[in-house]
Amino acid sequence: MPAAAQSQDSHFARNVTGICGVELLWGLGMPVVIESTFLQVFLRNLGASSFLVGLIPTLMSAGTAGFSLISWSLTGRLARKRGAVLAAHVAAAVPILAFGLLLGASGIRSNTLPLFLAAYGLFAIGVGLILPAWQNYLVKIFSAERSIRALALMMIIQSAAKLAGSLWLVRVVERYSFSAVGSSLVFTLVGLLFLAGSFFFLLTVEQPQAPEPGGGGGLRLNRLRAHAGANRGFLLLLGTDLEFFAVGGVIAFYANFATEYCGIAPALASGLFVAFAYLGGVLANALLGWANLLAVRDKYLLTKALGTAGILLLAAHPVPWVFYLVSLLFGASRGTRQMVFAPAVKRLSGASDTTLYFAVSYILSLPFSMGLPMLSGTFLDRFEGWGAWSYRGLFFGMAVLSLAGLYFTQRVPWKGPARGADRGGS
């Protein structure tokens, strides 16, 4: 084993504890602000149209794509990146906390909706600064042989925390509905959880890393083309995310579909849907990650096929039990992607600092991550007269896109590890 890998593995337990601490507290708050069914119903209660509901994932996509290269530019020349990753997490927490405090002080007014959109936009910018540097940091502090196990455990903790957070949301909505008091409590607590969780990065240990040539100090298009843009395996890996965005497009609207046309109570749609999704993530990360069942390619194929089947089932037979089942399938698919994507980028890139590759991934996927929610919301507003079939038609379209993602999954030149190669003691 190389000396660098031995050094990384000597801090394995401490680094896993640090990143799991972050994800525990962030995971408790994520059901409120990321792929949130709670936000769908909250915005509807503020009078938002389907277009504005679809604007939420669009804002997140714009923030991640627009500021991912800035993240690389700011961190590319840093030998140690822990401080930058921590600072970005703190910056993302502040707008959510500020909105919660303001809502508690002023109540729900005519300007609450634009204020929320402004706060969420700032949060999305913070997430854009976080993601490339954070993903690079995760694959930096663990050896290639143990990265999937480490990230699987991290995602199990995050998913379990999301599950607990979503069940807490059900209780809050049942008690307070979407009143100013209840909503303020939710957003303030989420901001505090995000803020406190950020400081668990101080437990982690990183090895100094030589700065990437050309990293930081400028955004060089020739460097993007010469590295990430010319890597066929990396580009095919991005093609697999068509399923990821298709599932995300369904998640953005299926809670409103459930409450408006399928007789499911808002409290259940805003809490239990995500609870089942996070349960699916826990199961996928435990079986496919920590237990390391199946090769990397087969992990992706299985869970993406299940996600695609879930979209088709929801479009064809939207009865209450189906919503819970497809939530479970969606969670398994997205949990596997979050576990496998970063190590796969590391392998396919061959780079010591993969921040640029992660940044480019958000830019190249922008037409789908940003465009799909906007187009979907516009479609639902335009064909509102179709009733439930406006949603079902949208979901069938997303299933076609998801099938394209499955095609690219089979084309990726997966370089391993094969089954068992990622095993190792904790």
Image: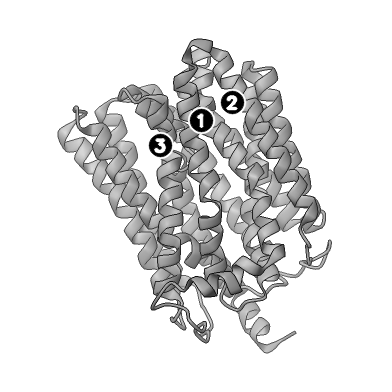
Residue 262 visible, this orientation: no
At label 2, counting other C-alpha atoms closer than 10 Å, the crowd grade (few under 14, some 14-19, many 20 or more) is: some
Q: Nearer the viewer, residue 192 or 107?
A: 107
Q: Tell me how the rendering is colored.
A: one colour
3D distance between C-alphas at marks 1 and 2? 7 Å
Type of amino acid under label 2: Leu
Q: Which of the numbered marks, if any, corresponds to residue 376?
A: 1
How far separated are the C-alphas under marks 1 and 3? 10 Å
Quarter of the image for residue 176 reads top left
Disc with the residue nearer the chain's start (1 vs 3): 3
The disc, 2 or 3, on the residue closer to the chain's N-terminal end is 3
- For the point 31% across and 22% down, which residue is it? 47
SS category of the residue bearing label 2:
helix
Residue positioned 64% across, 15% down in the render: 319
Q: Is residue 249 visible?
A: yes
Q: Residues within 10 Å of mark 3 (few under 14, many from 20)?
A: many
Secondary structure of the residue carrying tag 3 is helix
Residue 213 in the image: above or below residue 60: below
Which secondary structure, mark 1? Answer: helix
Tag 3: residue type? Leu
Label 2 and label 3: CA atoms lie apart by 16 Å
Quadrant housing the C terminus = bottom right
Task: Name, please, the residue furthest toward the left.
Answer: 106
Structural crowding at the residue carrying mark 1, measured as other residues with C-alpha within 10 Å and reported as few (<14), some (14–19) or many (≥20):
many
Vertical relation: 1 (above or below) 302? below
Front residue of 103 and 202 = 103
Q: Which residue is mark 3?
A: 55
Which circle marks residue 394 in the picture? Answer: 2
Q: Which mark is residue 191?
A: none
